[in-house]
Amino acid sequence: MAKICDLNGKKPDIIYPTFWEYKVIFDSNADEKSIIKECIKERNHKITPSNSSKNGKFKSFNLSVLVSSDSERLELFSLLKKYSKFVL
């Protein structure tokens, strides 16, 4: 069975620098602006609200960040994951 990201066993060719899109989900009481600022530092970025859960426990955001390498992209993913509920 093929997976969505199956490229015949090859990594995708990503041309850097590029804006990488993350979906970040926080608890409703989290200070998302401070958390994101701490993770991305001075990188060029854009954050837009996405959805809130029906019961109001979670809120999500679309985060677009300028990254210059594969390692930087993955490092940001790890940092965001450390301080949020979910990162996609």
Image (cartoon, rainbow, N blue to C red):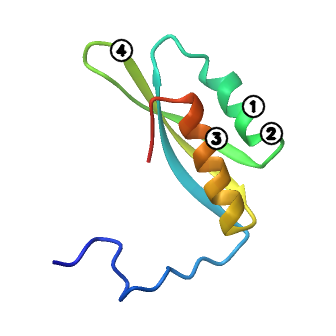
Q: How crowded is mark 4: few (under 14 residues within 10 Å), some or many (20 or more)?
A: few
* Front one among 48 and 76: 76
**Farthest left residue in view:** 1
Q: Where is residue 23 in the image (x, y as percent from the top left)?
A: 47, 43
Tell me the element at label 2. loop
Of the 4 image quadrants, the one containing the N terminus is bottom left
Residue matched to label 4: 57
Image depth: mark 2 or mark 3 in front = 3
- The residue that appears at 84% across and 42% down in the rendered structure is 42
User: Spatial distance from mark 1 to mark 3, Cα to Cα?
Assistant: 9 Å
Q: Picture quarter containing residue 32?
A: top right
Q: Upstream in the sequence, badge 1 or badge 4?
A: 1
Q: Residue 29 at what x, y percent from top left?
A: 50, 10
Check whether the beta carbons of the residues at disc 1 and disc 4 lie within 8 A of each other.
no
Amino acid carrying label 2: it is Lys
- Dots 1, 3 in contact, CB < 8 A: no
Residue under the point 77% across and 49% down? 44
Crowd band around label 2 with a 10 angstrom C-alpha radius: few (<14), some (14–19), many (20+)? few
Q: Name the residue under label 2.
A: 41
* Pair 1/3: label in front: 3
Three-letter residue code for mark 4? Lys
- Who comes first in sequence, dot 1 or dot 3? 1
Tell whether label 4 touches label 3 (CB within 8 Å).
no
> What is the x, y in percent for residue 13?
56, 82
Upstream in the sequence, badge 2 or badge 4?
Answer: 2
- Residue 38: assigned label: 1
**Residue bearing the label numbered 3:** 79
Earlier-in-chain disc, 3 versus 4: 4
CB atoms at circles 2 and 1 under 8 Å apart?
yes
Q: Earlier in the sequence, mark 2 or mark 3?
A: 2
Rendered residue at 61%/57% (across/down): 74
